[in-house]
Image (cartoon, helix red, strand yellow):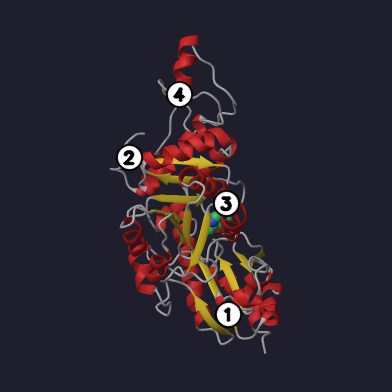
């Protein structure tokens, strides 16, 4: 891949990875083709054997997908990137590329719900086991290591409580034992956090969230050094959860405005978090950008800002939280996040509704908690929308 290391993120976002065809198109072309034609039998043989680089079949590679991969790799500061059909496909590909029967994962206990299901119910069937530990307690990660531990898997900030895992500290523990570290960088995106620079081996993304940012397509990616992504590529090439060319094309255009969107959404979130913290009907706000966040200093050290996810507890329980949700006319009642349109969700009855009340309480997710993924609307309009419900709490 081309070396873009001299360029700044703004430039990478709109320029990195583009390959023009003979037609000289200015925008990136969308190549809707499932296979590619060779000049000769000999070239076909060289392409299949890997002796000659080039496209063969869209399950292996596609020029539009390659442009997306190269642009995201440049933004993450990664040598290579392999795009996948979704964020979950990226996590599955990473695990099956690097783990085998008998291996063990140590993972944060506040991961995305489907990631927990994947580890507990699907990978477990292949004989790969997982121990879940608190994201914020490096000693617990170290204590969970077994001789067969091959992977640390974490997400930071966590959902919905925005806990911060110390990427540098966890990487030091893992690397001392030859364990790989993978970070799900979905919430921060490379605009706010670069896990590879902090020592992590691999970054996974749900491109469905901020990278698209406008709620249109699913996508995912694994970024890292070629010697690690190569194995992910081999898995995809055979198992098939590759990114479609159309989705790659949408995501390429998403990357062009990623920095503008993420910075503006995070600035809105910071203002909304401060307003909520001062609100008489709000008991507590969880936002890494606030000095009241228990890991505010760590967040400042490893993230450029607090991000665009704000959680808060209303004074009261489910009834009061639902009053806020049900009085929203602007905020979308949906569990999705990363969109330009602000979303609101009640984790205890939706994303975390299937876990037992005891486990929920242990995770700190109580009935009064609400999560907001802040978009691009005017903060004053978001405040007015929330105030309608908050003012009804007795
Ligand atoms: C949404 C999400 C995923 C899964 O991504 P999909 O594209 O929906 O498969 C993984 N991790 C995090 C943190 C997410 O928010």
Q: Is residue 228 above or below residue 55?
A: below
Which residue shows up at 46% across the image and 65% down it?
A: 157
Residue at the spot of label 3 = 123
Point out the quarter of the image occupied by ligand 1: bottom right
The answer to which of marks 4 and 2 sits earlier in the sequence is: 2
Viewer can see residue 207: no
Residue at the spot of label 1 = 313
- Is there a contact, CB below 8 Å, between mark 2 and mark 3? no
Question: Mark on residue 74?
Answer: none
The answer to which of marks 2 and 3 sits earlier in the sequence is: 2
Q: Nearer the viewer, mark 1 or mark 3?
A: 3
Locate residue 365, reporting x and y percent.
58, 75
Q: CA distance from mark 4 to mark 2?
A: 21 Å
Which residue shows up at 53% across the image and 52% down it?
A: 128
Asked which quadrant contains residue 52, the reply is top left
Residue at the spot of label 2 = 4
Residue at the spot of label 4 = 54
Mark 4 residue element: loop
Locate residue 181, reporting x and y percent.
40, 54
The answer to which of marks 1 and 3 sits earlier in the sequence is: 3
Q: Is residue 279 above or below residue 22?
A: below
Mark 3 residue element: helix
Mark 1 residue element: strand
Q: CA distance from mark 1 to mark 3?
A: 34 Å
């Amino acid at each position: 891949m081309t070396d873009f290391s001299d360029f700044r993120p703004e430039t990478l976002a709109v320029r990195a990875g583009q390959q023009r065809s003979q037609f000289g198109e200015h925008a990136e072309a969308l190549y809707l083709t499932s296979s590619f034609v060779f000049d000769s039998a000999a070239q076909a043989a060289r392409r299949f054997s890997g002796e000659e680089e080039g496209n063969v079949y869209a399950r292996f590679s596609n020029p539009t997908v390659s442009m997306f991969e190269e642009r995201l790799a440049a933004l993450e500061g990664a040598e290579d990137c392999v795009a996948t059909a979704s964020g979950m496909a990226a996590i599955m590909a990473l695990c099956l590329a690097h783990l085998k029967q008998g291996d063990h994962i140590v993972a944060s206990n506040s991961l995305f719900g489907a990631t927990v299901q994947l580890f507990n119910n699907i990978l477990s069937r292949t004989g790969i086991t997982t121990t879940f530990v608190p994201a914020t307690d490096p000693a617990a990660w170290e204590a969970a290591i077994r001789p067969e531990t091959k992977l640390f898997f974490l997400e930071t900030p966590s959902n919905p409580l925005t806990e911060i895992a110390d990427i540098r500290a966890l990487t030091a523990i893992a690397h001392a034992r030859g364990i790989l570290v993978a970070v799900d960088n979905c919430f921060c995106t490379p605009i706010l956090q670069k896990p590879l620079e902090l020592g992590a081996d691999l970054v996974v993304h749900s491109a469905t969230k901020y990278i698209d940012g406008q709620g249109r397509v699913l996508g995912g990616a694994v970024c890292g050094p070629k010697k690690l992504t190569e194995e992910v590529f081999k898995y995809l090439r055979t198992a098939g959860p590759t990114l479609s060319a159309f989705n790659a094309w949408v995501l390429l255009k998403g990357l062009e405005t990623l920095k503008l969107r993420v910075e503006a959404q995070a600035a809105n979130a910071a203002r909304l978090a401060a307003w909520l913290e001062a609100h008489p009907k709000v008991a507590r706000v969880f936002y890494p950008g606030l000095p009241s966040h228990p890991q505010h200093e760590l967040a400042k050290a490893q993230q450029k800002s607090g991000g665009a996810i704000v959680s808060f507890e209303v004074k009261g329980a489910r009834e009061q939280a639902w009053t806020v949700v049900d009085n929203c006319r602007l905020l979308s009642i949906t569990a999705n996040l990363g969109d330009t349109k602000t979303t609101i969700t009640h984790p205890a009855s939706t994303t975390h509704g299937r876990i037992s009340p005891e486990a929920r309480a242990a995770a700190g997710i109580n009935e009064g908690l609400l999560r907001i993924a802040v978009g691009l609307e005017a903060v004053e309009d978001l405040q007015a929308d929330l105030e309608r419900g908050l003012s009804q709490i007795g």
